[in-house]
Each structure stands twice: as structure tokens, then as C-alpha cells.
Image (cartoon, rainbow, N blue to C red):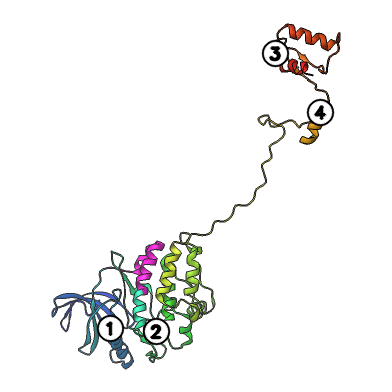
Amino acid sequence: MDSRVGTTFGKYNITRLLGKGGMGEVYEAYDTGKGRTVALKILAEEFSHDVAFRTRFQRESQAAAILQEPHVIPIHDWGEIDGSLYIDMRLVKGRTLLELIEAGPLEPSRAVSIISQIAAALDAAHAEGLIHRDIKPQNIIVTPADFAYLVDFGIAEASGESRLTTAGSQIGTLNYMAPERFRDPVGTPAVDVYSLACVLYESLTGEIPFARDSLENLVAAHIASPPPRPSAANARVPVAFDDVIARGMAKEPDDRYGSAGALARAAQRALHTVPSPTPPRPTAPSQVPATDPTVRRRAPSSTPWVSASSWKRSKRTQPRSISKRRCACSKTTSRSTWSAPRSGSRCAKAFARATRSGCTSPTVTAATKT
């Protein structure tokens, strides 16, 4: 049973538990002083006397309070009550991105929209010299209108500030942790870009980037394994997203996008990138069988090709001849050569018969002119 549910914490009436984090618990509570319902984060009791944790908790309040970006949960108040530190935040009605992903991969356009909103929140934090260091679906709340909020700056780190980590503890979530985090250098905004790319991959595919059977193998994958391809895990994801994830999850910080917003813009472009069409393979011309009765074929010509000049010369030097011309009136075919027929010859007699019958065949006309 949750010990604080149903109790009073200073001016707050705690009604229900909303969630637990690495530093404490978040409750829905009613602020009797302001007359409003809020989200109240209280530092876990076992850490309340730890100087390092108390310092980090107070820093979260100050860091989030100075951010005026719409996608960062607004901070109403913070302080200490009965030896316990707390943060009073706006209560947002919605579900975490993790809950949405558990129902299945998001449509690429919806995933990009949510990631773009969180990228805007990160750019605002980075501009103030703050690094979130724990970007994950659990820390993203999405309203029914798909308005996204980034929460939990409890482990936010100021640029150049010493890391407040107790011995043996690790800040951040391994599934989304940048490779350089395991080498423990000074954190840069690039670690948030890497984590955001991991969240984008999970939103598109419904799977974490590196699923391994042990923490050692998981760490090794982040350090050495190539970034996974979302299009291979989900066929509905455009191939252009492969390059976005590859650059966002690059092993070297300098090889990643220069900002979270740059990652989001690349994802937006990937939505509208049309893959280049693959040229069709050349195919051999279809061969129709010679025996196909439905295909009419032109018989090969036996007449040799003769140039126009040669034909004109032959026309002047050779006698005119008519071969196989049909007379319309006699319905016969003359195979004779009409070339100045001699009197009494067979050709002359045929000519005389055709003339008496009134034939106007071009054959006869041509013969009379020869």
C-alpha cells in the first residue's frame, strides 16, 4: 500500500500515486493554498538525507523552472516540507509514450510529430546549458491531442558541472544511453540526441534498439554494434529513416546531428522522401512461333533493290512491257509483252480484239503508246 496516498503533505492532500522514478515518487495532489490539482514529486525517504541526492533534486527544480518551452512541464513551486524535498508541477492528463508503444508501433508521421516536440524542449534546455541525460519513453507524456511533454529533469546536469552520482549508481537508462556515457566523459547535448534517436527507433518499430540478454551485451552493443535499421524491423517505415537513425545513433558524438531539432527535421524530411524507382530489367523481344496461324507474315520479296537513277536509265533504254495485267471486260490475263506489235502477230490480234470490245484497261492504253 502506498504510504502517502490519503495523507496530507503540508498544504497538499495526496490522492493517488502517478508513478515512481529513480529519485522519488510522483503523486496527484490537491493544493489547498492555490485551489488546484497538481503533480507532486517527493524525494524518496531513503535518499532524503543524502547530500548528493538533495543537491541534484534542488537543481532539477531550478533547471526546469527557468525553461519557458511549452513542451517542458511547468514548475509551480519547490522546496522542503518535514525534511522531504518536493516539486509542485502541472498535472497533465495523458499517457506516457511507453504506454502508446506497448499498443504497437506508431505511424511514422505520429512518431515524428512527438519526437519533434520533445526535440524543441531539449533544444531549449541545451540553450540554457542543461542536459537531460535520461530521455526515454517513460519520461514523455502525450495528451489525447498528441501534445507531448518532457518530464523528469531530476538527473539534469548543467554543462561543465560535476556529476553527482553515488558509488555504484548509473544515471540514465541503459537502453537509450549514448556510448560515451559508459566512458564517463563530461556530458554534452549529443548524449540527448543519441537517446532521442533511440526513442524514435522504438516509436517506429515497437522495439528497443538493442535487445540483449545481459547488461554486458547491452553495453557492448551501444559501444560497438551498428545502429539498427527501422525499415528492416517494420516494413511500413520508409527506408529514408535508416539514415536518420544511423546518424542520430552514431558512435562518435561529432558524427551525430548538431542538435535535437536537426534530428527532428531530418525525420520530417524522411517522411516525404520518395525512394528512387528501380529501372526495369531489359527483356528479350517476344518471339512468335513461325507456325502460329494467327500471325500473318509478309512473304520475302524476290525483286532486288534498284536505285532511282538506275531505274530511270533502264526505263529509257528498255521497251515497255506489261505482265500479268487483268482486262476488266474479258477477265483474262495477258502475259504478252506489248512492244510495238507487228502486223499479223498474235499480240496485234489480241490488241484488235480488245479495241473492238471497248476495253479501257491501262494495260491496253499503255500498249497503244508503245
> Taking 287 as reference, is 153 above or below it?
below
Q: Quadrant of residue 137?
A: bottom left
Q: Which residue is mark 1?
A: 66
* Residue 31, horizontal then vertical, whole percent: 16, 78
Marks 1, 4: nearer the viewer: 4
> Residue 305 at what x, y percent from top left?
78, 35
Q: Which mark is residue 95?
A: none
Residue receiving disc 2: 171
Between the residue at mark 2 and the residue at mark 4, the CA separation in whole angstroms equals: 107 Å
Name the disc covering residue 316, or none.
4
- Residue 88, visible in the rendered structure: yes
Q: Which residue is mark 3?
A: 360
Of the image marks 1 and 4, the number of the one nearer the N terminus: 1
Side of 226 where 336 appears, left or right: right
Where does residue 303 sit, x and y in percent of width and height?
79, 31
Front: mark 2 or 4: 4
- Tag 1, which secondary structure? loop
Lateral position of residue 88 relative to residue 125, left or right: left
Mark nearer the N terminus (2 vs 4) = 2
Q: CA distance from mark 2 to mark 1?
A: 22 Å
Which amino acid, mark 3? Thr
Q: Are marks 1 and 3 in contact (CB under 8 Å)?
A: no
Residue 104 seen in this snapshot: no
